[in-house]
Image (tube, rainbow, N blue to C red):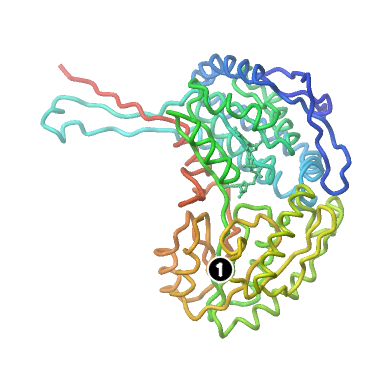
Amino acid sequence: METHVEGKKMFLAGEWVDGKQWIDVIDPQDGSLVDRVPAASKADMEACIEAAKAGAKTAARMPVFERMQIIGKAADYIELNAELYARTISKESSKTIREARKEVGRAVETLRLSAEEARRITGETIPFDQSPSGQGRVGYYRRFPLGIIGAITPFNDPLNLVAHKIGPAIASGNAIIVKPATVTPLSALMLAEAFFHAGLPEKILSVITGRGSEIGDSLVEHPAVRMISFTGGLETGLSITRKAGLKKVGMELGSNSPVIVLDDADVEDAVASSVSGAFWAAGQNCLGVQRIYIQSSLYETFRTQFIDDTERYIIGDKQAEITDMGPLITEKEAKRIEQLVEEALAKGAVLETGGVRDGAFYSPTVLTNVPENCTLASEEIFGPVVLLYPIADLDEAIERANAVDYGLQAGIFTKNLDHAHRAIEELEVGGVMINDSSDFRIDAMPFGGVKQSGLGREGIKFAIQEMTDTKAVCFKLG
Ligand code: NAD
């Protein structure tokens, strides 16, 4: 595989372009230099948007079978070079090699779904004569691309979350400009490389590397960009929403997801799913399990098993096959987690296990007795820390699960159908997983949050709806 990434170029409108200034990509595990990418300027962004205007016309005219072929070829390219993609993810981010391989597999699936959904972008006929004024008319609506999509993505899934923007955008005939996370740009550039090899016509796709604070506004505020599809933190999301003006915004934001374990649950299953959900990607996961509400009669059994399983986690070298959990994305992030835990302990929380920082590493941590006035009781932790609470019954669990500003996904472990249905009805979230933790997703399902967790939905079919507009057509018959 020839790679343009080592050439440290960004992909602007179909060309590999050098920068005048650079951003170092650092391995958080040991501070070593992985690579360097251009720090794009506002002028680079302007040029990208100008090119995308032409790209949007090309994309919209591209027949569906060609879109399907190109996206399919990009998926094949990634599959063929899967291990190189996985090594890159694991090097530039904080994922272990096993987590990175899983992400590569999902990105291939995301692209194949995108190719497949392209053929299902349909409309429906409209019975115009339902209104007296519509008599003697027939018609339909169809979906049309918006034009240019601006995509801004986070560090924690540096390949698949970018695939979730590019796949549906191209499937639905849009041009797209991606600004990947500053700390993890290499996987996104490698995704551009897959589309370059797949023969995507130029100007349809750009992956522009740089700092959000420097080039973000030029993308977000530009009137020719018809949608900002953002995945990232609440603060950045709010700032983008304020600046975007009259364009669509898709907001995939954070959460502090709850899991409810009722007394009829399969405890071993609930513990295994919740431990994995809490510590996947060192807890840097929008769906990560943060708050677990356990019915009192099960609490002691669950707590003991949860701590046992947590203590078996192997922390260390990301690239080693045996490692379960790597570092946080930066040492600064690990220090932020350390401070949140210290604040909770000072307010009376009990440290059951973990609580140790070593550089960018933070050990998997279980807290109990966490007072509601601690930051980590109500805010997103985005690190390997989980809170266990005993609850009397489902009423209390639902009330406490909902008592936060976020609502992405929730999990409930129970064999009681009535209880499961009540959770589905009453939990204020974008998805409820029965007998799974909050951390369960397939890439085809509708995905997104309520409250401060976001606006709109991803999951290919649903992203395509967001990235298209309907156009109504009416024939007046003679
Ligand atoms: P972040 O908000 O710090 O950064 C996200 C992106 O925004 C990056 O590309 C960054 O460079 C860019 N950015 C920063 N300032 C900007 C500005 N002023 N204008 C435009 N762009 C700007 O988020 P992060 O730390 O990379 O990711 C972690 C967050 O993402 C967590 O809150 C997590 O829950 C959330 N997330 C949500 C989902 C979801 O699907 N709901 C998925 C993954 C991550």
The image quadrant of residue 196 is: top right
Q: Position of residue 426 (x, y in %)?
A: 41, 64
Give the residue drawn at x 53%, y 57%: 409
Residue with the mark numbered 1: 372
Could you tell whether 149 is left or right of 322 in the image? left
Q: Secondary structure at mark 1?
A: loop
Question: In the image shown, does 162 or 172 lie closer to the viewer?
Answer: 162
The image quadrant of residue 142 is: top left
Could you tell whether 377 is left or right of 139 in the image? right
Q: Is residue 455 above or below residue 2?
A: below
The image quadrant of residue 425 is: bottom left
For ligand 1, give the image quadrant: top right
Q: Is residue 326 above or below residue 206?
A: below
In this view, which residue lies farthest toward the front?
346
Q: Is residue 237 above or below residue 269?
A: above
Q: From the Cβ of disc 1, is ligand 1 less than 8 Å away?
A: no
Label 1 neighbourhood size at 10 Å, few (<14), some (14-19), many (20+)? few
Question: In the image shown, does 269 or 121 lie closer to the viewer?
Answer: 269
Question: In the image shown, does 253 or 175 lie closer to the viewer?
Answer: 253
Kind of residue sitting beneath label 1: Glu
Could you tell whether 78 is left or right of 119 in the image? right
